[in-house]
Amino acid sequence: QMLPVLAFYGSHIPLPTTLNLKNGLPTGTGNVVIQGTQVGSENYGLGRFDWSLSEKDSLFARYLADQAFLTDPLSASSAPGWSYQGTNFNWFGSIEERHIFSSNLINTARFSFSRPAQTAGTPESYAPFAILPGLPDTRMSVNGLGVPGNPVLGPRQDNPVQYLQNKFAEADDLIWTRGAHTLRVGGSITRLQEIGMLGNPGGGAWTFTSIPNFLLGVA
């Protein structure tokens, strides 16, 4: 049952560079050092628009976009093959109209929209680990190796992750000035939409209590 997984070990994971000994005798385990490089990027853009419609009316608009990517090759697995890729894409936009009724009475109306969005997950999938159809690969680990962190093969448990928030806001303010006094009244309405998905534990996890049980496929 475990032969496909063992074949994956042999073809994707380097052989140990040092062997673990107990009382001077080999334990059947070894250590290998694997290094990974995180790759990230971020793009940022800001636009602004001002327009004087007349002596009493003006329009202001602003748009901001921020997009970032990050790839972590060893976020969850002890061996390369299951990277964790995250994307953040945030939009912010606002528009405001100002009208002057008189020298002491001004009205401002505003509308704004924001959408912070985040997605993350592991795009790679391998047949020996795709045990549950339609779900991410299954995580596999072996206890009792005497190695900190309990080496794991497979993607992160929180896979995939998606979070999206839409926020719509409308507001209107009336500003009245008389001498040294200013009175401001108004109101605002905000609508919030949240869409989230957390695939935990993703494709599930198998934990083997020993190397012999792992080789026998007994979790």
Image (spheres, rainbow, N blue to C red):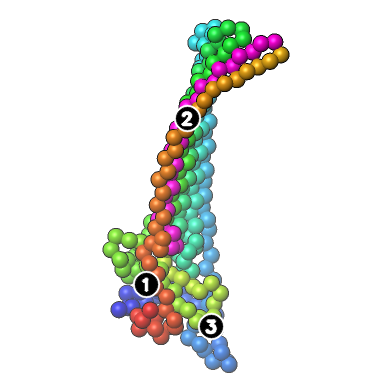
Say the numbered circle drawn on residue 40: none
In the displayed structure, 190 sits above or below 213; it is above
Q: Please, what secondary structure does the residue beneath circle 3 have?
A: strand
The residue to which callout 3 is attached is 19
At x 51%, y 22%, the residue is 172
The x, y position of residue 71, in whole percent, is 48, 54
Element under label 1? helix
Q: Amino acid at mark 1?
A: Phe
Pointer 2 residue: 189
Q: Earlier in the sequence, mark 2 or mark 1?
A: 1
Q: Nearer the viewer, residue 57 or 217?
A: 57
Query: Who is closer to the viewer here, 101 or 50?
Result: 101
Q: Name the quarter where the C terminus is drawn.
A: bottom left
- In the rendered image, residue 176 lying in the magenta stretch gets the answer yes
Q: Is residue 88 left or right of 123 when viewed as pictured?
A: right
- C-alpha span from label 2 to label 3: 66 Å
Q: Which residue is mark 1?
A: 8
- The answer for how far apart the CA atoms under marks 2 and 1 are is 56 Å
Q: Which of 200/218 is in front?
A: 200
Callout 2 secondary element: strand
Evaluate whether residue 22 shows in this view.
yes
Closest to the camera, between mark 2 and mark 3, is 2
